[in-house]
Structure formats: C-alpha cells, structure tokens
Amino acid sequence: MLNIGDCALQAHVVDITTLDVDAIVNAANTSLLGGGGVDGAIHRAAGPDLLRECETLGGCATGDAKITAGHRLKARHVIHAVGPVWHGGERGEAELLASCYRRSLGLAREAKATSIAFPAISCGVYRFPADDAVRIAVQTVIDTLPHAQSVERVIFACFDEAMYSRYQAEFERRL
Ligand code: AR6
C-alpha cells in the first residue's frame, strides 16, 4: 500500500469484476462493444444491458475513456478506457496509456466516486511491456489525484502474482 495525501493506493490479486467499489475500469477497445480479456469478463459479469448501454456511446478514441453504469456488477460504474496497442514505443504509447489513467480519474471525480479499481490496461492482448506500464500507471495516478479529490482508494487489480509484484516494487520504490 502507498498513501498519497488522503488516498490509499493498493494492489491486490483479484478478479476485478468481483470488486465492490464505485467504479471499475475496463481495458476496452475503440468500438466499446466488448472483446476478450478483462473486457470480456466485465461484460459477462455485468450482463447484456452493459452492451446495450455501450452501443449508445459511439465508440471511444485510444487514450480516452467513457463511463457507464455497472448493471449487474457490484461496482456502481464501469469506466471504459482504451489503451494503446504496443508498437515498439515510438507511436506515443506511453502518453496514450497515461491519458487513460488521467481520463478515468476525471470521470471518477465527475461521478463523485470515492473508490476506483484499474486493471493493467494494455498489458494483455495489447502487449505493452508490463514494468513500464505499471510505472506509468502509478506515476499518472499520483500526479492526477490532486485533481480527483473525491477519490480515497485506488486499487490496482492484478490477474496474477507476477503483476502484483510489479506494483509492490513500484510502491516500495516510492516509500
Ligand atoms: N481482472 C483483473 N485483471 C484481468 C482480468 C480480470 N478479470 N482478466 C484479465 N486481466 P487485456 P489489453 C488482466 O488483454 O491488453 C480485449 O479484447 C490481464 O492479465 O484484457 O488492454 C479488449 O476488447 C492483463 O494484465 O487488455 C481489447 O480489444 C490486463 O488485465 C483488448 O483486449 C489487460 O489485459 C485490450 O487489450
């Protein structure tokens, strides 16, 4: 855990779809119409009304995010962020990934969310190098928290121990 002002940053090995938080973030694609990985898991757990709501949104640009209700999830909202596909690092991937975290926290603030959980956006099918992605995620959240005062708890939901260790190492580096 890492405390930044009044906000606690935590990493947990957990299925993000099970979390009872104000908002979970989805690692979506530009269509916002579902897919595999965490996106597929969120749509399965939230039920078909999530897709119906997503169909009204008109997609989403890479680096941006859009918010919906949580439907059958315990989470009140889903924030659908579109991370970059990794192409070697010369196509603005780092800035686009940082933008996902900034935009998601902005939407969380507008929804008056106090708790938000992020998956490791772009670290699966989109192949962003995980160590770099984790550093960008933690740095961007820390930099953006002063503009997202409602947020008291940020959870980095990890699918496995290897990803969890990366967040722990990043927290410890900052203690
Ligand atoms: N809870 C937490 N983390 C998870 C879960 C889960 N239930 N399931 C997977 N992960 P990915 P991307 C982790 O591929 O790279 C989809 O098809 C996973 O281990 O879901 O941003 C979308 O529609 C990895 O660390 O997202 C897009 O087309 C992380 O979540 C595309 O994949 C992200 O992996 C987005 O690719």
Image (spheres, rainbow, N blue to C red):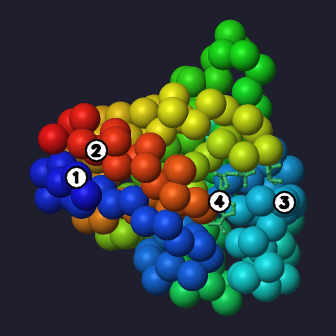
Q: How far is disc 2 from disc 1 in space, using C-alphas?
A: 6 Å
Task: Tell me which label, 2 or 4, sits earlier in the chain.
Answer: 4
Asked if the residues shown at circle 2 and circle 1 are in contact, with their CB atoms under 8 angstroms apart, the answer is yes
Q: Quadrant of ligand 1?
A: bottom right
Left/right placement of residue 61 relative to residue 143 reads: right
Which residue position is annotated with label 3?
36
Q: Is mark 3 within 8 Å of ligand 1?
A: yes
Please indicate, yes or no, whether residue 102 appears anywhere in the rendered image. no
Report which residue position mark 4 lands on.
26
Instruction: Compare marks 4 and 1 and give the one earlier in the sequence.
Output: 1
Query: Is 164 situated left or right of 144 in this image?
Result: right
**Relative to 4, is 160 above or below?**
below
Within-10-Å neighbours for mark 3: few <14, some 14–19, many 20+ = some
* Three-letter amino acid code of the residue under disc 1: Leu
Query: Closer to the camera, 5 or 14?
Result: 14
Please identify, in this view, whether the residue under mark 2 or under mark 4 is nearer the observer: 2
Name the amino acid, label 4: Asn
Res. 47 in view: yes
